[in-house]
Each structure stands twice: as C-alpha cells, then as structure tokens.
Image (cartoon, rainbow, N blue to C red):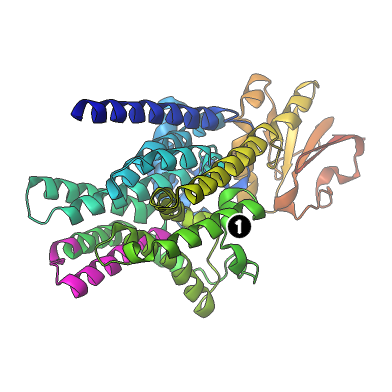
Amino acid sequence: MVIQKSNLFNKYIIFFFLIFLFGVLLRVYNLNFEDYWFDEQAGFWVADPSISLSETLERSKELDRGTHLVFNLILKTFFYVLGYDPSIGRILPLIFGVLSIPALSYLSFQINNNKSFLLTAIISSINFYLISYSQETRLYSLVFFVSILNIIFFFKIYDLKDLNKSKFLFSILYILFTVLGTCLHIFFFIIIFSQIIFLLVNYISKKRTILFEIFIIFISICIYLFFMFDSLLLQMGIKEFWIQQVSLEFFYNFFFSRFFGSKIMGLIYLIILLYLIYSNRVSIFKYNSKFLLLIFILFFSYFIPLVYSIFQKPILIDRYIIFILVPIIILISNLLLNENNTKKRYIILFIILSSTITNTYIEIFEREISKPEFSKSLINISNFEDKSVIIKAGDELTEKLTINYVKNIKISKDNNINFLKSSDDLSNLGKLWFVCYQPINGFDCSAKNYIFSSWEILSETNHKLLTTYQFKNN
C-alpha cells in the first residue's frame, strides 16, 4: 500500500514537471516579440547601471515619485551583472514568472494536500495574462511571485501553534517577503489586511492566540515605513491620477475578461468560481479554513480600492491586483476536485482546460503587435547613409527616456544611429529622420515647432504606433 502511494506520488511529480516545462516554454517563446512601450522605457531609464545610486533615486522621484523604485533597483542590479540591454531586461520578469508556477502549486498543495496542485500548475502555466506579464519589463510578475511566498509563510506561521525555531525562521521569511511586497506596490497591503481579518476571525471564533502573528505583521509594517515613508508621502500627494472610474460593465466581469483573455473566457471562469464557492460554502466559510483567507483576499482586492475610489480618486485597475489570481486559481483548482458529482466535475474540468488552451493558443501563435515597432523603424533607418534621428516627445523628460531606450537597442548600436535632442543645433544637417511615438504625442506627428518643419519630406513610413519621416534640408 505504501509502495503504491509512493509510485502514485512519483507519477504526480513527473506530471508536474512536464506541466512546468510547458509553462516555461510558453513564457520563453517570443520573449522579445515586441519592443518596449513607454512604461518599460521609463523603468529602463531609471535602472541605468552606469549612473550612481543617488541619481537613480532622483530619476525615480522625478518620474513616478518613487512608486516603482524597489523593482527598478533590482533591475539596475540585474543590468549591472548581465549588461544594459532591453532584451536582457525581459529575462528578469521571465524568471519571476517561471518561479511562480511551482510556488503557486506548492501553496495549493499546502492548503489542500491532494492532487489539485496539478490543476493549479496547469492553469497557471497556460494563463496568458501571467505569460504576458512574464514578458514585460515591469514589476508585476515579481509582485505576483512575492504575494505567493507571503501567503505560504503566513500559513507556515499559522500552522505552528508553539514558538520554536521553525516558527521564528518562517517569521523572518514572512517579514522579508511582506516588506518586499509592500515596497514593490502599495496594493500589497490588501493581502496584509486580509490576513489580519483572518486572524481576528480565528481569535473571535476560537479564542485562538494571535498575538505573535499580529506582532510579526506590525514589525513588517514598521520596517516598510522606515524605508518607504518618504515615497509613501509622495504617492499620497498625487491629486490627479490617470485611472478612470470603473464603469457599470466592470461589475459584470470584475476584470475576469482581462485575467483570462476575453469576455467569454472571463464569464466562464467567473461563473465557475461563483458556483464552486457556493457549492462548497459550508467548508469554505469556517473560521479555520485556509480557503477563508483566499476569500478575504478576493473580496478586499475589489472592495478597498472601490471604496477609496468613491471618497478619493479612482485607483482600481487589473494589474494592480494581479495577486488576485492566487485565490482565483487555487479556489477553482481545489474546489473543483472537491466536487462530489463526478460527471459535473469532469464537465467543468473540460470546459476550463479546453477553453483556456484554445485561448492561449490564439494569444500566442496568432499574436498581434500591440506595442511600438521601434526596431522595424530603426532597421529601415539603418539602410540609409544619413542616420541622424530626432524623437518627437511632448516634454524633455519623455524625450530623454525614449532616446535612452532606442539608443540601447542592438540595431542602433550595430549601425551607429545618432540620436539628437530637439534642443541640439540641427541647421547644419543635410538630412534628418523624425520618429514620432504616437501615443505620447496624442497621435499628433506633425513637425510644427521644429526647425526642420519647412524642410522637404522625402519619405513617410508607418509602423505600429510609430510614424517615421525623412526630411531633407533645402
């Protein structure tokens, strides 16, 4: 009997590694399919390893009031070791995206010690939302990964009733990932708040001692304030924000259409999740059920930002709560395998896997360019003898960080393309390339207000979100 269980477990492990390998391949495939868009270019500028730490801090404050400082410092270190190149920058989020698969699978197994971790691995491996953020040089794949680790070590502390070496070790790791998570993104506090509520429910229902856990959370918050208090004040001082108030349509899908690829896919996952929560409500809504913490994270991830949006300003957008996929995926994986009706279980399983695989196939193998095609524009410019380029930007800061990005693309380096500032003396040039990144210029690509606006236009080339002109000095 023991041998049979051991053989079965070994088969599960082999199956898991096959799933994991498939998830890795999906994330590596077309890693640099697209060029950087503006937010990635901004982080790339801040993370320049050739500048001093103090200058990095100043750039971060100038750009976004230090909002993404911690990730950009990690990225800066990564560039320092491997080289300052946009294509290398994509490797960092890829690493965190890949590590999230086994981490989430382990959390699933930790919550419910059965084979549901395999379904968790499958869904997380083929979810295109997670794949796409594993291929974007921004902090969100790291936030997702750290949120998983935070919950893992929270449960480690929660499960150990007595104070011992293991509990102290897990507490240190919990503090580490809590501080890192909150420093990465302020929305990480939603997870912390959910954990506090979970502990209070346990205390009220069972009179369980929660003093140690509350103390650990308090220490984590104090450490965060010590390092990030100035940045927090700067962020709180923002009076206007670019995010729009959620529309009525939001309450029909709760970003599930974004999380799972389309309105139909979002509806499938939302209906299945609600059904499984309802059908398992007795076991979920117990004070000591680990599923209850996942429900709290799910609820407060929407509730807190929505309440803040009513009284202050809109702040809710899907990527800010990327960690909500942790409870969604784990709840679906575990509750589905708890379904007593075998026929119903297999029908739901078929719907989830078939629709997700189909959607992921379309997203990956019929993928369309959605970001500016700088590389194609630069390839075109490199074919000409005159390679002086002006980047149209609305302000000096935008111009600086965009030039910093394009001059570090391999094509620019290999072909000695010369990028000039709008403030440079251009009167002695015979020919000039004028590249307009449409979104940051309100899709106005005219050359008015530039000295060369009266020059002859030799050519106009259009790529995705870019218009490139070649001017000749009369």
Write the residue at 34% across / 26% down.
11
Segment colored magenta: 186-213
Q: Position of residue 72 (x, y in %)?
A: 44, 44
**Amino acid of disc 1:** Leu
Is 192 rendered above or below residue 436? Answer: below
**425 or 434, nearer to the observer:** 434
**45 or 310, nearer to the observer:** 310
Q: Position of residue 420 (x, y in %)?
A: 69, 37
Q: Looking at the figure, which quarter contains the N terminus?
A: top left
Write the residue at 42% across / 50% down.
69
| Secondary structure mostly seen in the magenta stretch | helix
Is 242 rendered above or below residue 21? Answer: below
Q: Residue furthest bottom?
A: 311
Write the residue at 35% across / 40% down.
115
Q: Is residue 208 magenta?
A: yes
Q: Position of residue 159 (x, y in %)?
A: 18, 53
Q: Position of residue 130 (x, y in %)?
A: 51, 43
**Is residue 383 left or right of 175 when viewed as pictured?**
right
Is 148 rendered above or below residue 456? Answer: below
Q: Disc 1 designates what residue?
A: 267
**Is residue 301 left or right of 400 when viewed as pictured?**
left
Mark 1 neighbour density, 10 Å: few (under 14) some (14–19) many (20 or more): some
Q: Is residue 291 magenta?
A: no
Total numbered circles: 1
Q: In this view of the protein, can residue 332 be seen by the observer?
A: yes
**Is residue 245 left or right of 122 when viewed as pictured?**
right
**Quadrant assignment, res 82:** top left
**160 or 138, nearer to the observer:** 160
